[in-house]
Amino acid sequence: MGKRKVKAVFFDRDGTIIRQVELLHKVRDVRLFPRAAKAIKEINKLGYLAIVVTNQPVVARGIIGPKEVDEIHAVLLGRLKRSGAKIDAVYFCPHHPEATLKKYRLKCRCRKPEIGMLIQAAKKYGIDLKKSFMVGDSTRDIQAGNRAKMKTILVKTGHGGKDVWQFQSKPDFVVSDIMKAAQVIRRFA
């Protein structure tokens, strides 16, 4: 008999958990949305893994390196932890098809709306993607969730789905913020 699969909530970072800052590269610019920690804490209580999946073109453009992205994530996770919220894993894609730095200039399988980060997490943690959620503020996030056959929740913070010119994607739910997303997910727990 196989190991039982777990459920997860995949969160975009910028515009979903923290305020949208274009090309965020300084720790001092990391600002949690007011109810983000409470929402993630709710997800933890419901028994879902909480995983961040984020595109980081700041690496591809040479603004900061992967080490500095890890430092930003350490600060973010520390702030959440102080409020009793736990992120189980963070995945980021440093690639961009038009990257300034040649080593990151490629069309990869991890940059959302591709699903490489979701598949990588699913393999590592034994996640059943069909019983999981993708929560994000952009059509890119929703498209990734759709492609991975997950339930999708568009939050109206950050880009709020106003980037419809990028990807044609239809979320399963549209809510005002990450806390409202947690309330939707509670109905499926």
Image: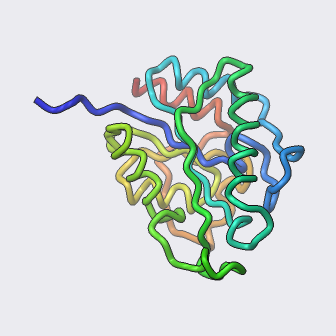
Horizontal side of 151 relative to 16 (left or right) equals left
Image spot of residue 135 (x, y percent): 55, 44
Q: How many marks?
A: 0
Name the foreground residue: 78 vs 113.
Answer: 78
**In this rendering, is residue 141 above or below 182?**
below
Horizontal side of 167 relative to 29 (left or right) equals left
**In this rendering, is residue 121 above or below 41?**
below
Quadrant containing the C terminus in the rendered view? top left
Kindly identify the residue that appears in the image at 68 percent across and 44 percent down. Answer: 16
**In this rendering, is residue 78 above or below 11?**
above
What is the residue that sits farthest to the right in this orientation? 28
| Residue 54 placement: quadrant | bottom right
| Residue 22 placement: quadrant | bottom right
Name the foreground residue: 152 vs 32.
Answer: 32
Kindly identify the residue that appears in the image at 63 percent across and 27 percent down. Answer: 39
Kindly identify the residue that appears in the image at 70 percent across and 27 percent down. Answer: 80
Color theme of the render = rainbow
Quadrant containing the N terminus in the rendered view? top left
Image spot of residue 137 (x, y percent): 64, 51
Image spot of residue 45 (x, y percent): 51, 17
Kindly identify the residue that appears in the image at 62 percent across and 60 percent down. Answer: 55
